[in-house]
Image: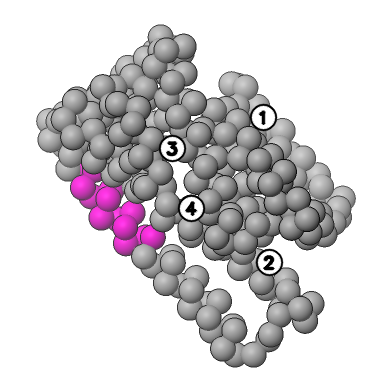
Amino acid sequence: MTAPRALLLVLLVAAIVAAAAGLPLTRWLVDGAAWAELHPRGAGALFVAAYTVAAVLAVPGTLLTLAAGFVFGLGFGVALVSAGSVLGAIAAFLLGRFVARGWIVRRIADSPRWRALDSAARHDAFKLVLLARLSPLLPYNMSNYAFGLTAVRLRDYALASWVGMLPATVLYVYIGSLAKNVAALRSGQLDAGWPTRALLVGGLIATVGLTLLIAHRATRALRHRLEADDGATPERAAE
């Protein structure tokens, strides 16, 4: 088992044990949000650093993204997650290009999808990275390192990554902030009238729908792009 997977397993086990022991996780999140309101710069810097390290270690950042919405709210949470995810993507890209190139090549050399990615990156690299970020077809953590092996320029990679990750970032941060609003509704700290509830639910539905639509279209475009460069069939490209 690799170190990132081992770390993820430890975190999952810890979460299960905490839930079984009845630890006040919600209370900790609320306390964390209160502390972040008093120390926004320090809390934001710690969060960005943690997100960057998680991306380098290939630890899924979904829980961190949800926590950002709960602790920091939608606007500040999106800014922090964007900063952390882009910095983490850049760090992994540079590690893949200059430090761990041989190890990564051995891991992905036999994949038709990654061979097609390398070929496609020699043309419109910015569009390719943008589609890869908008689509779930290529996993975020591994693609960070894989793009480092291609001809993609760092400037194009960073900008396309930031733009392409925004829709999913907004969605997950919004869900996290929605959880905080629901907690506020239950405690009576937020207006419980139907307009407020309708706004929260409507915003979630609209955000989910738009994100899924963007991801679907990006996935279709990315598949066609990779198949064109690899000469693969749809089934082979989806391996």
> Of 61 and 78, which appears nearest the observer?
78
Q: Which residue is mark 3?
A: 140
Asked if the residue at tag 4 contacts the one at tag 3, i.e. Cβ–Cβ closer than 8 Å, the answer is: no
The residue segment tinted magenta is 211-223
Which is in the foreground here, disc 1 or disc 2?
2
Residue 25 x, y percent position in the rendering? 80, 54
- Graded by Cα atoms within 10 Å as few (under 14), some (14 to 19) or many (20 or more), the crowding at tag 3 reads many
Instruction: Determine crowd level at label 2: few under 14, some 14-19, many 20+ residues with C-alpha closer than 10 A.
Output: many
Asked which quadrant contains residue 84, the reply is: top right
Q: Position of residue 190 (x, y in %)?
A: 71, 80
Q: Secondary structure at mark 3?
A: helix
Q: Which residue is mark 4?
A: 169
Residue 133 versus residue 74 in the image, above or below: above
Q: Residues within 10 Å of mark 1 (few under 14, many from 20)?
A: some
Q: Residue at 67%, 73% (x, y): give it.
A: 182
The CA span between labels 1 and 2 is 27 Å
